[in-house]
Amino acid sequence: MSKQIKTNVMRILDRAKIDYEVFEYPHGNEAVEGSEVAALMGQNPDEVFKTLVARGKSGAYYVFDIPVNSTLDLKKAAKAAGEKSIEMTRVKDLKKICGYERGNVSPLGMRGSFVTVFNDSALCFDRIYISGGKIGTQVKLSPVDVIGYPNAVTGDVVQNN
């Protein structure tokens, strides 16, 4: 049995003494859409969260964690961030802004310190899944723990269906 290589996300969780489980899924070397990640892991997509990075009119960056089958509502996101408007960050800019590339963005271990907003639906579950910091890896943990660690807030930031 090979020893699992820990990501920065796992090391952060270990240092903070936050309990988590690691799940891996097949991926090749490319990013996998969030809904496909949930399907590959056999998990409820409402419990699997994707991390998005956006920029406010002020120039500040914000992080939003929403269920993989949801779409970020830019007006609600701007309100939650206290901005007049907000726009999604270009994929090619992710690495220089937060240190992650598309497909492995996690709310933990970012290059900078950003206001982070979890959709309030996260609190409906005992455990949620977030990126483990590399493509093919997810961590399952308490939403209360992960929201509390980066001092995130919660809010309704997704489009209503």
Image (cartoon, rainbow, N blue to C red):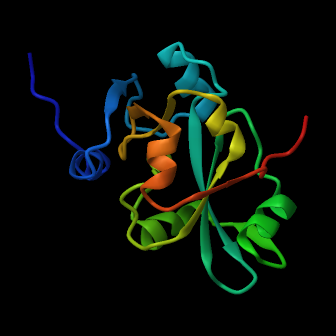
Picture residue at 77% right of the left edge, 61% below the top: 77
Residue 139's quadrant in the figure?
A: top left
With 116 as the anchor, is 46 left or right in this view?
Answer: right
With 156 as the anchor, is 16 left or right in this view?
Answer: left
Considering every residue shown, the one lying at the far right of the view is 161
Viewer-proximal residue among 8 and 123:
123
Residue 73 visible to an observer of this rendering = yes
Eyeballing the image, is 129 above or below 106?
Answer: above
Picture residue at 23% right of the left edge, 45% below the top: 14
Q: Position of residue 114 (x, y in %)?
A: 52, 71
Q: Position of residue 102 (x, y in %)?
A: 50, 51
Eyeballing the image, is 54 above or below 141?
Answer: below
Viewer-proximal residue among 103 and 44:
44
Residue 45's quadrant in the figure?
A: top right
**Quadrant in which the C terminus is drawn:** top right
Residue 102 visible to an observer of this rendering = no
Q: Position of residue 63 (x, y in %)?
A: 59, 61
Picture residue at 42% right of the left edge, 55% below the top: 149
With 103 as the anchor, is 88 left or right in this view?
Answer: right
**Quadrant in which the N terminus is drawn:** top left
Q: Position of residue 151 (x, y in %)?
A: 50, 62
Residue 123's quadrant in the figure?
A: top right
Picture residue at 9% right of the left edge, 22% below the top: 2
